[in-house]
Image (tube, coloured by chain):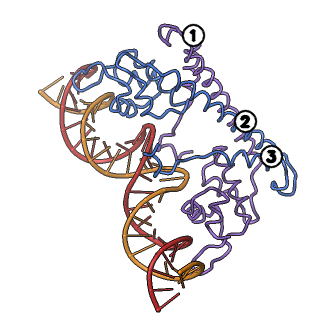
Chain colours: A purple, B blue, C red, D orange
Amino acid sequence: MDITEVTKASGLPASTLRFYEEKGLIRSTGRIGLRRIFSGDVLERLALIALARGAGFSLDQIGEMFTPEGPDIDRTSLLAKADELDRKIKELTAMRDGLRHAAVCNAPSHFECPKFLRLLRVAGKHRFRQPNKLKDKI
Amino acid sequence: MDITEVTKASGLPASTLRFYEEKGLIRSTGRIGLRRIFSGDVLERLALIALARGAGFSLDQIGEMFTPEGPDIDRTSLLAKADELDRKIKELTAMRDGLRHAAVCNAPSHFECPKFLRLLRVAGKHRFRQPNKLKDKI
DNA sequence: ATAAAAGTTCAAGTCAACTTGAGGTCAAGC
DNA sequence: GCTTGACCTCAAGTTGACTTGAACTTTTAT
């Protein structure tokens, strides 16, 4: 397949495919002239990458999962990720319920509504970004 | 309260508080010399910001929610956001189950396992980033 | 044969949400 | 009165995941 076929089949733009190749996440099997040729497997690989991204893995982490013999994912880290997703699901569920409640609640201020306050506490537990400083200490 | 008290009570670094103020998300009520003074309300405001962030609103969107008379959130967009969260929750749930399954599955390749393949299809539906180009067209 | 369409490389730009750094100000404690 | 440490400002840097642009080469269609 050439790159356009892959873009059509995967929905990803060519620039992303080149970027992924450069990062070592996918490989092209050869060239015709300058043009990349991909084998059909690349689609499965891309699906797997989409999966991992959806589960919250970074591209670098995904790269580490791919051994020369194909994807081989450490089961322990899979389970850890599943647990992490579990926590996130609980948070999002609380938020969803809170949002629905807030939309119909007629307390004078949301801050006088116990449901809303509980929601705020849940929300407060969620950290969004790690300080840059800490990155290499972990 | 001075800024350090707010950082302690909210868990947010001073730099973030200044950044939020600059963005118009919070206000300091005055100064002592150069130093900002905050009133206690800022903590509720910060909790609300954390909530909205957790629900997936961007800081800009959050800014739009705050009218001069305090937060006033359009109920329709709250419900829309709740629906969006619902979809994300479903996705994450499918992924979590898929990850747990992948951890114990002993099919020779994950690609031969129907459960895993179903998971991949779910994952594929999730788009992570919008092309820059489209940004202003929306 | 020629021009358009599609592919290529490589460096630089984008975006959100902050953080960091340099250099300056000022209130409080000794 | 003087140091010290907390606070300030403002510009620039960071991160991840890409995208964009310029300049170039090839394939394909006429």
Point out the tag, 2 or 3, that comes first from the N-terminus. Answer: 2
State yes or no: discs 1 and 3 in contact (Cβ < 8 Å): no
| Discs 2 and 3 share one subunit | yes
Per the rendering, the mark at residue B93 is 2
Q: CA distance from mark 1 to mark 3?
A: 40 Å
Taking depth in this image into account, of B127 and A70 the one nearest to the observer is B127
Q: Nearer the viewer, mark 2 or mark 3?
A: 2
Residue at the spot 76% in from the left edge and 44% down from the top edge: B99
Q: Secondary structure at mark 3?
A: helix
Q: Which residue is mark 1?
A: A114
Q: Is residue A62 above or below residue A101?
A: below
Residue identifier under label 3: B103
Left or right position of B106 against B50 = right
Nearer to the camera, A107 or C9: A107
**Disc number lying in front (1 or 3):** 1
Left or right: B8 with respect to A87? left
Q: Are marks 1 and 3 on the same chain?
A: no
Q: Mark 2, chain letter?
A: B
Instruction: Give left or right: position of A8 versus A116.
Output: right
Amino acid type of the residue tagged 1 in the rendering:
Pro
Q: Are marks 2 and 1 in contact (CB under 8 Å)?
A: no
